């Protein structure tokens, strides 16, 4: 998915059978870096939905405007 906070891409994944998630980032889709300073809600599960603050929602809408 496009990174909403900086140029590049994010890959979000789960570690099978461990209840852990990870994120890697790339600017060119060739070289990837594991992001260490990341957190997920305690109740996060594969394919889950989480709450956003109004500020977070506005930032996402600005970065990814609705297409007609």
Image: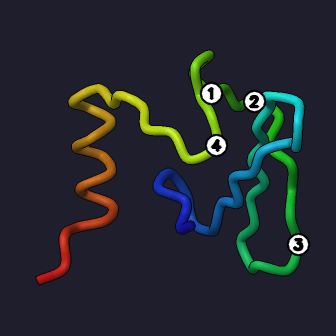
Spatial distance from mark 3 to mark 2, Cα to Cα?
A: 18 Å
Give the residue at mark 3.
Answer: 31
Q: Residues within 10 Å of mark 1 (few under 14, many from 20)?
A: few
Say what secondary structure mark 4 lies in: loop
**Disc 3 versus disc 1: nearer the observer:** 1
**In front: label 3 or label 4:** 4
Sequence order check, earlier mark of 3 and 4: 3
Gap in angstroms between the C-alphas marked 4 and 1: 11 Å
Residue 54 falls in which quadrant of the image? top left
> Disc 4 versus disc 2: distance between alpha carbons?
20 Å
Disc on the earlier residue, 4 or 2: 2
Query: Mark 4 or mark 1: which comes first in sequence?
Result: 1
Q: Is residue 27 left or right of residue 56?
A: right
Contact between labelled residues 2 and 4, with CB atoms less than 8 Å apart: no
> Badge 2 is on which residue?
37
Q: Residue furthest top?
A: 42
Give how far apart the Cα atoms at labels 2 and 1 are: 11 Å
- At numbered mark 3, what does the secondary structure look like: helix, strand or loop? loop
Mark sitting on residue 46: 4
């Amino acid at each position: 998915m496009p990174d909403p906070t900086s140029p590049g891409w994010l890959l979000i994944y789960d570690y099978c059978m461990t209840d852990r998630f990870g994120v890697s980032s790339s600017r060119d889709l060739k070289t990837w870096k594991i992001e260490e300073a990341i957190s997920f809600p305690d109740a996060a599960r594969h394919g889950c939905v989480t709450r956003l603050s109004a500020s977070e929602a506005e930032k996402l809408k600005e970065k990814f405007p609705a297409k007609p």
